[in-house]
Amino acid sequence: MFRRVLIANRGEIACRVIRSLRELGISPVAVASEADARAKHVRLADQVVILGPAASRESYLRADRIIDACKQTGAEAIHPGYGFLSESEVLRDACDAAGIVFIGPTSAAMAAMGNKTRARGVMQAAGVPIVPGATRAAKDGADVTAMAREVGFPVLLKAAAGGGGKGMRLVERESELVAAFESCSREAASAFGDGSVYVERAIIRPRHIEIQVFADKHGHAVYCFERECSVQRRHQKVIEEAPAANLSDATRRAMGAVAVKAALAIGYEGAGTIEFLVDADENFYFLEMNTRLQVEHPVTEMITGLDLVKLQVMVAAGRPLPFVQEQLVRRGHAIECRLYAEDPYQNFMPSPGPLRRYRPPTGPGVRVDDGVEEGDVVSRFYDPMVAKIAVWGDDRDAAIAKMHAALSELRVAGIRTNRAFLQELLSHPEFVAGRYSTALIGSMGALVAKAPSSADEDQAAALAAILAHRQEKSKKPSAVAPSSDRGWSVTARADALRRW
């Protein structure tokens, strides 16, 4: 086992990896940009190396500086987390050349899955069902038009090197195709350095269901059940749950078997996720493979009892998986919400700034993965996610109720967040029934427009607190405001504001 591991990441995932490393008796080493020099993950680590300025391209995306940090601190391995260089063949090759273990798959596996058109071809050859469409990039407007006519409208234009919803366009009519292709290509080139775009048939109102796979260096692979990730905004996941609701056991098993087949086909090692689109008849199609740990991995851990980070480290150290498929058991239901520093009622405008108050929920079955503490600053330089709040219940109804309670307990001030929006999503009839698709958020336009903004809530809470303070100072009994704002509803705060 390793003595020292460097985490080539920041924020909540760096903090989460550090905790598992400590349980394994491994010394964690952090890296940070100058903007993150006092961040929570730095405070938790044994050592830290400052990589460079705030801009990611000068810090977290510098493979050479990360390798130098390993040499400087004596770290024997690198855990890449997710995002940044987690799926970088360059970093993996640099690790191999320096004799440093990369906790993740080989360069060949990343290359096979890193380009979507190449991945579709590999999966098709392995007998994995793929969404009908091209297995090569379109050359120009005429080429993309020919491809779309063959596939049939509506079509989805997708960046071959893309991810996270960037470089993606839904095109319903041929007259819109060329302009959408050119726009998609420009966006892909800007985001990924590769403007290649391919055509795929658009599956209307699909479900987005993914399978967690795990493979060791000895040819063994398993799947750790599925996660439902259909609650998305612009192809970015917002709420995830495990297991998927209203999915037949036969489909669950079939998807799991196909996911293991896909992992073995590319000689995969470590944690990975096979993502599928599922239609109304439960036909499922390969979408992509993420060759890393997923943001939403906590819900899988909560229903299986596994620590996926520990497993990653053990597999990278050469140990075989400690179980076979038949030994994996799924228990209860888990839901994860992503808490963002943004205002969903102002077109999801980012809201970085100081956390004047941050009191995450606690209690049985509640897990919070975060990279901040009260008094920290949510940086404007990086992703605005503040925390992942995950809950576990005996069944789905219990998990939904627990998540509502957890979000109600959460206290944040100083920034706007999407908490009220998450609560709306959890209360939506389609979500409650477990019969929703990736179109759910798009269907909520009217509801979102009527919702109170978090800015109004913060202002009401702040003024109500001032009222309470003044009344307490004057020692007069108050029928309006308690001594703190804990437990106040938006309505109560607004009422206190009106009285004030």
Image: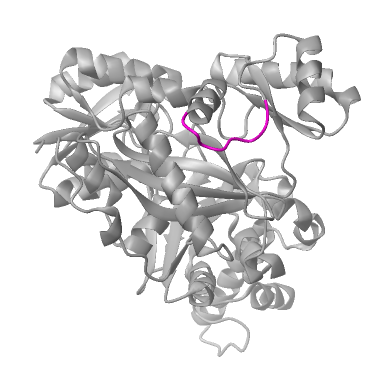
Q: In this view of the protein, which residue sits in the foreground, 442 or 448? A: 442
Observer-nearest of 149 and 108: 149
- Report the residue that reaches farthest toward the right: 175
Q: Quadrant of residue 156?
A: top right
- Relative side of 101 to 186, left or right: left
- Camera sees residue 351: no
User: x, y percentage for residue 60?
Assistant: 37, 25
Residue 206's place in the image compared with 359, above or below, is above
Q: Nearer the viewer, residue 189 or 326?
A: 326
- Residue 3 included in the magenta stretch of the image: no
Residue 209 seen by the camera: yes
Which residue: 50% across, 69% down? 403
The quadrant the N terminus occupies is top left
Question: As drawn, is 272 to the left or to the right of 467?
Answer: left
Main SS, magenta region, reads: loop
Q: How is the image coloured?
A: one colour
Q: Is residue 131 magenta?
A: yes
Tell me which segment is drawn in magenta. 126-133
Residue in view at x 61 percent, y 75 percent: 489
**x, y percent for residue 338:** 51, 53
Residue 132 drawn above or below residue 399: above
Q: In this view of the protein, which residue sits in the foreground, 206 or 339? A: 206
243 to 286, vertically: above or below: below
Q: Position of residue 57 (x, y in %)?
A: 44, 18
Quadrant of the frame with the C terminus: bottom right
Judge left or right: residue 182 versus residue 385: right
Q: Measured along the vertical axis of the image, is residue 315 above or below residue 239?
A: above
Q: Is residue 393 left or right of residue 313?
A: right
Quarter where residue 389 is shown: bottom left
The answer to which quarter of the image holds residue 189 is top right
Q: Measuring from the top left, give residue 112's x and y in whole percent.
A: 43, 22
